[in-house]
Image (cartoon, helix red, strand yellow):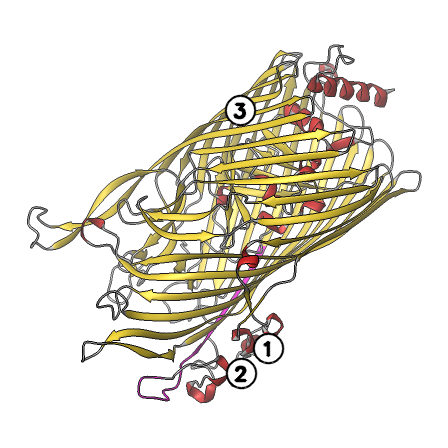
Amino acid sequence: MIRSYKLKIIIRVAGILCGHPVFAQPVPKHLDTVQVISSKAHTDMVHSSMLEKTSVPLVNIISRESIERSSDITVADMMQRVSGVSVLRDETGTPGKTVIRGMDPKYSYTTVNGMAIPSPNDRNRYLSLDLFPANLIDHVEVYKSLTPEMAGDAIGGLVNIVTRPVPEQKNFSIQLATGYSQLFFDRPYLGFKTRAVEKQSPYERYGPNYVAGSDDFSNDNLSFHTKHPLPDVHGNISWSKRFLHQKLGVIVMGGIQNIHTGADGFLILQNSEPQPNNVPGITDFVKRHFSTTSTRKNIYAAFDYRFNARHQLRFYQLYVNKLDAETRDAVDTSLAEGRTGPGTGRIAILQRSRMYRQSIEHLNLQGDHQFNQQLSFNWRTVYSIAYGNYPDRAELTANTGRIVGADNEVHQTPVLLAPLSRTWLHNTEKEEDIYATLHYKPAILKQQLDISAGTLLQYRQRDNFYNIYTFVPAITSGNGQPFTNIYDAVWYNNNGPQNPLGTVNTPGTYAAKENISAAYLQAKFHTNSWSITAGLRQEQTTQHVHSEADPGTPFGKAISIRYRDWLPSVHLGYVLTPKQGIKLSYYKALSRPSLYDITFFNMDLDNYNVAGNPFLKRSTADNFDLRYELYAPAIIDALQLTAFYKRIEDPYEKTLLSATDTLYAIAANGQSYIPAGKLTEQLRNYGTANNLGFEFSAVKYIGNLGIIANYTFTYSRIRQTKKFKQREDPQNPASDIITVTKTQERPLQGQSKHLANLSISYHLPRYGTTAQVTGVYTGRRIDEISGWYNLDNWQKGYTTLDFSLEQTIKSHWRLFAKATNLLNAGTQIYVANRMLIEKSNYKRGYLIGIQYRVR
């Protein structure tokens, strides 16, 4: 009887959302919980809209139906369709990290089935969402506000990935797809022998006292060849069934993807210091070509056991693995060294091989127990391990040039081999979580009051290894060593490294721990029109780092940080009519620096140096939201209007430091501080920031035509003191050049003022055909912050356009196709918002596939 009544409620709510005249009966104005009993369950967009409406915190949900219609490959692909969310792309245009409401990815966190997991990234706490294939996902929840029962490390928001549950009926599905990038129709792919890459350095293989020689290093990964790659491969399979009179449910899934991506473009390098009046100082023009193969593997299993209607257990096992094999082919033309006119100057030929393996193993056991109508208990235990590995990262460099000789003629110099570094970098991060919650609903208030209390114990341990070997070319001619190929290269020290023991005793090899203990108390109260959720969360954080830095170094050996945060929140909901309501919320949140961020680790990466900052403070923020919701099919199927405001204390942002800037406020070598020494990227705190904005989201179906539109306006401001280089007497061009300070107001890094996306779909149920066009606009935003006045690097706004087509045949077969980046959008970055310094083109991508399923 109870189950039947719940089903009637769900059917009525779905009917109102759909506007069907059969469901004309009134429905309760407030739903404390929603339980779906029918086998159709959670996959459709109607159900997602219902969950958004009844949720206490503000949330946007991407349904399984939406994922399939868009033929998404990873979770990152689907995020760009969420209101207020944009994605950051890597060198080849692959989306990965998310920016929620203009807040950099470090201000948000990701959970799987409600539980946090560690990151395999070598420098960041957050997860790149392209690690998670779309075939594993039931739906994705993007929370814009938090209740006390949710972890408080989410100033920007929370992305919760909900994996596929065990269905009520037996299910089998197999899917195969292939694709190709337009880039490799237009040019060949440059690759290397990935199997030749040694996973461990000689130090790890043979011990710390081992003297490495030439035989310990392969040359095959520095021998490059061109080819036309085979088509991409996408495959996955799933099976599920219930046993023991429906008490035990099992679902098992697996998949593999092999995808080729690339990019063509250029990069203009700058001096670490500008010219007078902060005119950018240009040093090099680098033409670049990227070729990358990404191989993803995943295994997923879930089990649930229902002892009875009141008690059940669930177990999730998730393994994801991603291997990127990247080649970067570049030609660096110096605009300073040896340049006496057009067509002259030093030229460097650079070919880089890089492999990056990331994997996550996640085990999650959950129990839900309803003792009686008033008392229930939920618990979770989680063990996760993330692994990231950069083995034998190397860049082969040879220098040549066109130099004006004594005869005033331009002469081509020989191609000479340059020094070579080979780096091993890997990290392991383990996490153990215990979570428990007790709910109590006093009978005297007729279930209108729900009091809950809970605790979280989270233990995270990170081990990082960094080792580098340096090779110096032997002088075999008057000018150096002419270069032909890696196999003929001759190095000093009998072709071995100059440091045969490696360089391990640095702050880059460290062990770190982070312990978080949390407790919360929360109360929910609702009437026919009002709902109130309020509570308080307390989080205690302890971080320790111990590195292998040389004992003679005056810093970097050990770091210890402790702090406590009190995080209140209040959420109010008012039902204006059965079809419209208002939600108002406040919550306090924080953002913790990652364990890497608080180390003294300092290394060369890509175009400049990167360094940790143990003096970095956590950020805290007060967050306010106001949302109006309308679900009126006769007018509009769903409408959400949301205003938000965030006041952020001590925001931390990536900043480019010049050689003379203070890296650490520690006295050394007769100076009162340690200078950066070279162009260096480091996280820095900057006072107080204000971030506010407005979100619009609408859904409308007109017959077979569906329209989903989102627009977000975000405005943020932060004041930063920056340097400005000028003449001591601006009116006298012969006066000395001095550096003064100026205050600059700017937006937060990564924040776009304007975000918009529009999806138009046409569905023919009679023929099983669905076509969809999706356009996404991402406004310009700061890519990197400079320490110099008005010299920030800005990424130009861009628009992407995708088209997808789905065709179902009877009840078992599904054909799908997708074309991405139809407008050939790429990355363009400007310094001071006026001079183009970086450009990348990714070209279009194509995908076609077939799926067979039995339900």
Q: Which residue type does callout 2 highlight?
A: Tyr
> Looking at the picture, which amino acid does disc 3 mark?
Ser
Indicate the secondary structure of the residue bearing disc 1.
helix
Q: Residue at x 44, y 54 (%)?
A: 598
Quadrant for the N terminus in the image: top right
In the drawing, what numbered circle is on residue 585?
3
Q: Earlier in the sequence, mark 2 or mark 1?
A: 1
Q: Which residues are magenta?
A: 461-480
**Closer to the camera, 800 or 611?**
800
Q: From the top left corner, tell me how far across and down residue 772 is, in percent.
A: 64, 35
Find the residue positioned furthest to the right: 245
Q: Which mark, residue 747? A: none
Crowd tier of the residue under label 2, counting other residues whose Cα lies within 10 Å: few below 14, some 14–19, many 20 or above: some
> Residue 477 lies in magenta, yes or no?
yes
Foreground residue among 27 and 379 = 27
The residue to which callout 2 is attached is 210
x 84%, y 23%: residue: 3
Secondary structure beneath dot 2 equals loop
Residue 244: image x %, image y %? 93, 42
In the picture provided, is 618 more to the left or to the right than 302?
A: left
Front in this rendered view, residue 766 or 504: 766
> Sequence order check: which comes first, mark 3 or mark 2?
2
User: Looking at the picture, how far across and down is residue 121, in whole percent?
Assistant: 54, 56
Mark 1–mark 3 CB contact (< 8 Å): no
At numbered mark 3, what does the secondary structure look like: helix, strand or loop? strand
Residue designated by label 1 = 205
Determine the image quadrant of residue 167.
Answer: top right
Where 185 falls versus 138 (above or below)? below
- Are discs 2 and 1 less than 8 Å apart at CB? yes
Q: Is residue 115 above or below residue 597?
A: above
| One can see residue 319 in this view | yes
